Image (cartoon, rainbow, N blue to C red):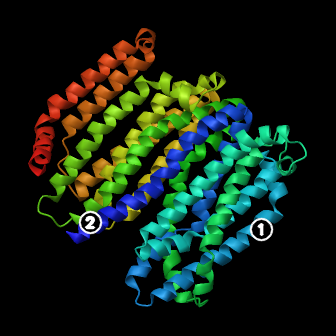
Amino acid sequence: MTLYKNLFKQTLIYGLATVLPRMISFLLNPLYVDTLPKQEFADVSIVFAWLVFFNVMLSYGMETAFFRFYNTEDNKKNVISTATISIFWSTIGFLFLALLSRKILSNWSGINVEYITYTIWILALDALVIIPFSKFRAEKKPMKYAVIKIGSVLVNLSLNVFFLIFLPSIAKTNPTGFFNTIYFENFQVGYIFVSNLIASLLTFIVLSPNYFKIKWHFDTTLWKKMTTYGFPILIAGIAFAINEHFDKILLDWLNVSKSDIGAYAACYKIGMFMVLFRTAFTLGIEPFFFSHASSENAQQTYATITKYFVVFGSFICFFVIAFIDILKQQLVPQSSYWDAIKVVPLIVLANFFLGIYTNLSVWYKLIDKTKIGAYISIIGAIVTLVLNYILIPKISYYGSAIATIAAYGTMMIISYKLGQKKYPIPYDINKILTYLVVTITFSAISFYIPYVRESYPIKILLSAMFLYFIYYNEKTMLLQILNRKKLRS
């Protein structure tokens, strides 16, 4: 029992540290929309997309390799020092080359060289804390991990609010004061990167003692094993980054206006509701998958969990799409951005497909065939790239949204088909498909029929009908859960 309590506690703490940064993005999105023109919002979104790619490349699978070899090698200090030295020198090399090339990068990308410089330093500082954070997890110190992670996020949020909201008014009311010396007009994008840079710097300072505690011994043989192990993780990470973020970069490359990219990137954030649900569900359930792998009814348990992900996810999917015109006023408060709101139903549904894929992916993790996950991600990335190149010149960012849903839908289907051959799980396909059909139908009615979209009483009625449909189909399980709670009380 103690084992499961500890497992739940650690999952909860790591989950909070993972989900909270995504939740903060909900608060930053309306702030950026309120303070930035669409063109500058596009610049921020494109740079952040590149950040994801370089974060993957600068870690080059070493984080996962660290966990693997920390748990298998007898000399754990050797693993820590080898991984730390590897990341340290590769990061220093990147920092040196990137700073030398920043003007070339600026001319090539069309992004201000100052923003490029900030981004390079953010990437370097974030890379230097990869192994210290991993060490906390390996040594089962979730509270330290969570406090520092959450602290960094809160610093970033606070600085964004200060620089973008309070600093301009403080500088104007007190033109001779200190704050006037750090206030620059039309520097909102710069302040966003400065906020991220300060948060990353403070995180590095807090974790920097780790660099003085290790023995600077580099085991070449171990390093070769770790990089070999981490290479497929690197490829999978790049493929994931393409599926998740490359659309903003491609839109820029294919000459879509920055104004349209900014609108698309802002409205895209509304789809994060499904991402939050998917992330929280996965963090809570994935340890359960592994702990029950040897149970007698493991496959049936996995099938039930996946079905209930679809049940709850389908309602969230419908609810977000049905009440999108309320959500947009909170998350994208400037009407000039609302041209791109038409992509949100596709993005929400795409993230729902990704969540189903994540649940279906348990089979290759349980049989230690994680390379298959990389192959599926690569197929998804190919679908993303091909459809973006075909569709963007014809229908602009709407093509990117179609490419996203096609990529995740393809990954979901491939994982299901392969899984049923390698590790059969008795999914209730009829019910899962029924919920998908009901979700898509109700969402389409709520969003694409003008009369229904403008009538909240009808959408509330549809929501009630959906909930009753769930109750009617799942009442046996729901009543069992309620009865258990009554017995415990």
Dot 1 falls on a residue whose secondary structure is helix
Q: Is residue 409 visible?
A: no
Measured as percent of width and height from the top left, residue 146 is found at 48, 63
Find residue 7 and report its horizontal and vertical position in percent.
30, 66
- Residue 332 lies, with reference to residue 309, above or below; the image says above
Q: Earlier in the sequence, mark 2 or mark 1?
A: 2
Residue at coordinates 66% horizontally, 65% vertically from top-left?
202
x then y, percent, for residue 325: 50, 22
How far from the left and from the top, in percent, is residue 276? 43, 45
Which residue is outermost to the top?
A: 451
Q: Are marks 2 and 1 in contact (CB under 8 Å)?
A: no
Q: Is residue 176 left or right of residue 484?
A: right
Query: Residue 238 has which mark?
Result: none
Count the marks: how many?
Answer: 2
- 479 shown above or below 445: below
Q: Secondary structure at mark 2?
A: helix
User: In the figure, is residue 259 to the left or right of 86?
Assistant: right
Q: Quadrant of residue 208?
A: bottom right
Q: Is residue 374 visible?
A: yes
Residue 459 versus residue 223: which sits nearer the camera? 459
Characterize the local packing of mark 1: few (<14), some (14-19) or many (20 or more) Cα atoms within 10 angstroms: few
Q: Which residue occupies the foreground of this view, 43 or 477? A: 477
Q: Which mark is residue 5?
A: 2
Image quadrant assignment for residue 264: top right
Determine which residue is flagged by label 1. Answer: 97
Q: CA distance from mark 2 to mark 1?
A: 47 Å
Between 403 and 458, the one nearer to me in the picture: 458
Amino acid type, callout 2: Lys
- Give the position of the N terminus as an image quadrant: bottom left
Q: Is residue 288 left or right of residue 93?
A: left
Disc 1 marks which amino acid? Leu
